[in-house]
Image: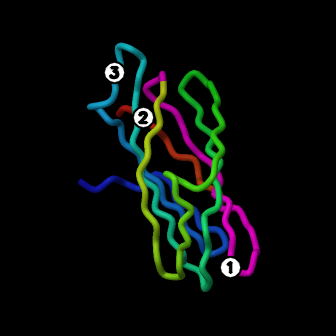
Amino acid sequence: MSIPILSANTVHGIRVDASAVLSNDDSFPTEHNHVFRYTIVISNDGDSPAQLVSRTWIIIDGDGHREQVNGPGVIGQTPRIEPGKSFRYQSFCQLKTPWGTMEGTYHMKRDDGETFDVAISRFYLKTK
């Protein structure tokens, strides 16, 4: 089953696509526990390699509760993405409400030391 792209953005030749689905097996709605699995594809459409150094996520649940998550890399990795190549990963987000949003920033670095940020456009986490 194909998961529709919910968010797409390109900055400095780096494209970020995001999609998300509810994980029914891991969620317990009667206990206000909703687990969303999201997939991110980071593609280098530019002319030079770029490494993902760190990330910042802003997660807002349906009640307006906001959480900011910062850290090195993603899923324990700091991938270096060559031109024409992509890096795909999956992770999850747990909310107390049946819907919310995620958005953020990847902090990137080129081989020559140039650093730049790539915005991750807002995408929705929702049960239906």
Q: Are marks 3 and 1 in contact (CB under 8 Å)?
A: no
Q: Are marks 2 and 3 in contact (CB under 8 Å)?
A: no
Q: Position of residue 72 (x, y in %)?
A: 63, 52
Please report the residue visible at 55 percent of the width from the left and 28 percent of the height from the top.
61
Q: Position of residue 66 (x, y in %)?
A: 64, 30
Q: Residue at x 54, y 38 (%)?
A: 101
Which amino acid, by three-letter code, is at mark 2? Lys
Q: Which mark is residue 28?
A: 3
Q: Position of residue 119 (x, y in %)?
A: 65, 57
Q: Is residue 19 left or right of residue 57?
A: left
Lower sequence index among marks 3 and 1: 3
Query: The residue under label 3 is which amino acid type?
Result: Phe
Judge by depth and name the residue closer to the eye, 14 or 115. Answer: 115
Q: State the mark number for residue 44.
A: none
Asked which quadrant contains residue 67, the reply is top right
**Circle 1: residue type:** Asp
Q: In the shown orientation, is residue 31 left or right of residue 2?
A: right
